[in-house]
Image (cartoon, rainbow, N blue to C red):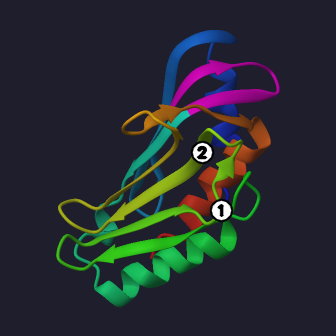
Amino acid sequence: MSFTPTIEDALNALTTGPGPQSFSLQHAGPDADLTVSLSAIDTLSCSVCSIRADVPSVANLGTSQLKNWADALSQRVTYLLEDIGPVEFDPNSGQALLRSTKPSDDGSTKRYYELVLSTSSNGSFEFARYETIAGQPGRHPVDMQLTREVVDRLLNDFVDTIP
């Protein structure tokens, strides 16, 4: 199922330029409400802070279905800077953690994508990018620089893989 015209309309409705912006797509797919947070947008690309979704239809999925969902996303989302893959499954909390299989590394800074799938509570996923800097504790969120076409494809792939 493609909802590309809806995504294009949402992106076109945003003001071009820097500044926090977001758009939400209600019922984008099988019971999915998406929210995309941006820090900048222009006619070709977006600086995406995060993509979040509430997906009540996945609430209380079994562990094998959660693993299948994580695998389906990993096989489908292959066009980012790094491939993503499952890193950890927590059957007690009903979560799967996917990250870049080989983070970008320039020597002192590593950047990676992270996607958390959750079947607990109302069901959800959150997609973001982080960086770690050698010698500094913790990690920091960084924007994902994506073309509008990649944003469209990513949102469609997220929705299409929902179990």
**Could you say which is closer to the camera, residue 110 or residue 65?**
110
Q: Image point 49% across, 73% down: which residue?
A: 86
Magenta residues (range): 37-48
Q: Image point 68% across, 43% down: which residue?
A: 107
Residue 140, how many percent across, how many down? 44, 33
Q: Is residue 72 magenta-colored?
A: no
Q: Image point 68% across, 47% down: which residue?
A: 105
Rendered view: 26 above or below 102: above
* Helix, strand or loop status at disc 1: loop
| Residue 102 numbered tag | 1
One can see residue 4 in this view: no
Quadrant of the rendered image containing residue 146: top right
Residue 43, how many percent across, how many down? 80, 21
Q: Image point 71% across, 53% down: which residue?
A: 153
One can see residue 57 in this view: yes
* Helix, strand or loop status at disc 2: strand
Q: Decide: few, some or many residues near mark 2? Use Cα within 10 Å; few <14, some 14-19, many ≥20.
A: some
Marked residue nearer the N-terminal end (2 or 1): 1
Amino acid marked by disc 1: Lys
Question: Circle 2 sits on which residue?
Answer: 110
Label 2 – label 1 distance at C-alpha: 10 Å
Q: Name the magenta segment's main secondary structure.
A: strand
Rendered view: 95 above or below 28: below
Pick the quarter of the image with the C terminus.
bottom left
Left or right: 156 in relation to 121: right
The number of numbered badges drawn on the structure is 2
Rendered view: 21 above or below 69: above
Amino acid marked by disc 2: Lys
Left or right: 106 in relation to 32: right
Extreme residue in the right direction: 44
Quadrant of the rendered image containing residue 125: bottom left
| Residue 87 numbered tag | none
